[in-house]
Image (spheres, grey):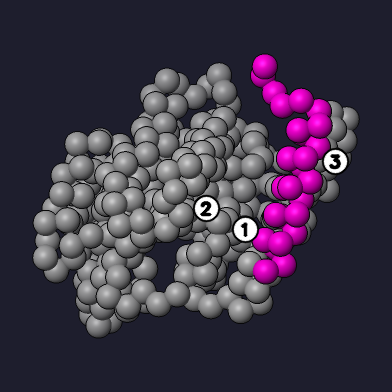
């Protein structure tokens, strides 16, 4: 038999309803009211909060510069050159970190590697899609697989994945990037279920879903995005919100938080014929800067 009998289904639903109410009233609600940021002093995390910072990046020049800035500010940091799209390099970095007595392990892992390939579905070539998959999806998977076993052995740690509003909504010219961001959302939700089943509740997963952020990833590929309701998020503000979500061990966090309604509740009311009007309501517009033979070609996206 593929499912429970009707009377069993009713009993299971009633039991779940009682458990859910008790969980909300006596566990989640008190936690939200008294929610505090956990201390990460002497822990290892790629954020500045009196922590040991480990940076894995393919861009050695930028990585070393960032480490120098952290050290000059009185922090502690280490740089490991790494192409996260190559599993062997990620595994080697993990071994180097675990064998370094000044580091020893990772308490909070932040996965943020990303490239942006913009274009029509037919116009993008195979390499555009392959590169996007290698960095934006496999890069996350390889990094998590390298450090997660250490966390599971201790039943302690936190993995943070930087998603996007594109983890919930596809957009014009975004078949490569949006597909990858949807995959990260699926990866984190599925891994969360796996950790529950393995009784590794001490390993926390946090997924961040920001709107457009003022970073080189955006500025190098498009003009400043415009929308009816949302402005581009300053990098400092985004970092502050990400850090707060990490230290409060949220399962997921939208930046700004009003995106939670747009990405969840509002999607229920989207229909085939209402979708064009909803798109006009939010009116997200930008110009793609396609660099071809040294020239910039602007494509209006409305």
Which residue is nearer to you in this view: 138 or 172?
Answer: 138
Q: Position of residue 84 (x, y in %)?
A: 29, 42
Tell me, yes or no, whether the two marked residues, 3 and 2, touch with CB atoms within 8 Å. no
For the C terminus, the quadrant is: top right
- Classify 10 Å Cα crowding around label 1: few (below 14), some (14-19), many (20 and above): many
Q: Position of residue 80 (x, y in %)?
A: 19, 55
* Predominant SS of the magenta segment: helix
Q: How many marks?
A: 3
Q: Is residue 275 visible?
A: no
- Residue located 23% across and 43% down the image: 90
- Residue located 42% across and 20% down the image: 126
Identify the element where label 1 is drawn: strand
Q: Is residue 236 above or below residue 145?
A: below
Q: Is residue 173 above or below residue 47?
A: above
Would residue 4 be counted in the magenta stretch?
Answer: yes
Residue marked by disc 3:
269
Residue marked by disc 2:
207
**Residue 254: mark:** 1
Residue extent of the magenta highlight: 1-26
- Residue located 45% across and 75% down the image: 38
- Mark 1 and mark 2: span between their CA atoms? 9 Å
- Classify 10 Å Cα crowding around label 3: few (below 14), some (14-19), many (20 and above): few
- Mark 3 and mark 2: span between their CA atoms? 24 Å
């Amino acid at each position: 038999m593929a499912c429970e009998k009707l009377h069993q289904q009713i009993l299971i639903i009633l039991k779940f309803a009682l458990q859910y109410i008790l969980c909300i009233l006596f566990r989640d609600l008190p936690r939200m009211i008294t929610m505090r940021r956990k201390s990460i002093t002497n822990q290892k995390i790629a954020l500045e909060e009196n922590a040991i910072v480990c940076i894995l990046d393919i861009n050695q020049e930028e990585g070393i510069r960032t480490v120098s800035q952290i050290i000059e500010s009185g922090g502690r940091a280490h740089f490991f050159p790494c192409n996260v799209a190559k599993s062997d390099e990620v595994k080697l970095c993990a071994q180097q970190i675990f064998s370094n007595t000044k580091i020893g392990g990772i308490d909070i892992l932040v996965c943020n590697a990303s490239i942006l390939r913009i274009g029509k579905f037919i116009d993008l070539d195979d390499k555009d899609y392959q590169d996007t998959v290698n960095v934006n999806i496999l890069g996350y998977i390889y990094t998590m697989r390298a450090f997660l076993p250490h966390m599971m052995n201790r039943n302690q740690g936190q993995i943070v994945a930087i998603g996007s509003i594109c983890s919930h909504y596809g957009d014009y010219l975004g078949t490569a990037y949006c597909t990858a961001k949807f995959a990260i959302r699926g990866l984190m939700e599925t891994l969360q279920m796996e950790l529950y089943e393995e009784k590794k509740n001490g390993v926390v997963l946090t997924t961040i879903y920001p709107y457009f952020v003022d970073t080189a990833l955006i500025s190098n590929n498009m003009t400043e995005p415009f929308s009816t309701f949302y402005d581009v998020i300053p990098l400092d503000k985004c970092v502050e919100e990400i850090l707060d979500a990490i230290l409060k061990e949220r399962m997921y966090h939208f930046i700004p938080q009003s995106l939670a309604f747009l990405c969840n509740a509002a999607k229920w009311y989207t229909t085939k014929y209402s979708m064009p009007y909803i798109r006009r309501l939010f009116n997200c517009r930008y110009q793609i800067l396609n660099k071809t033979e040294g020239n910039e070609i602007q494509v209006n996206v409305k």
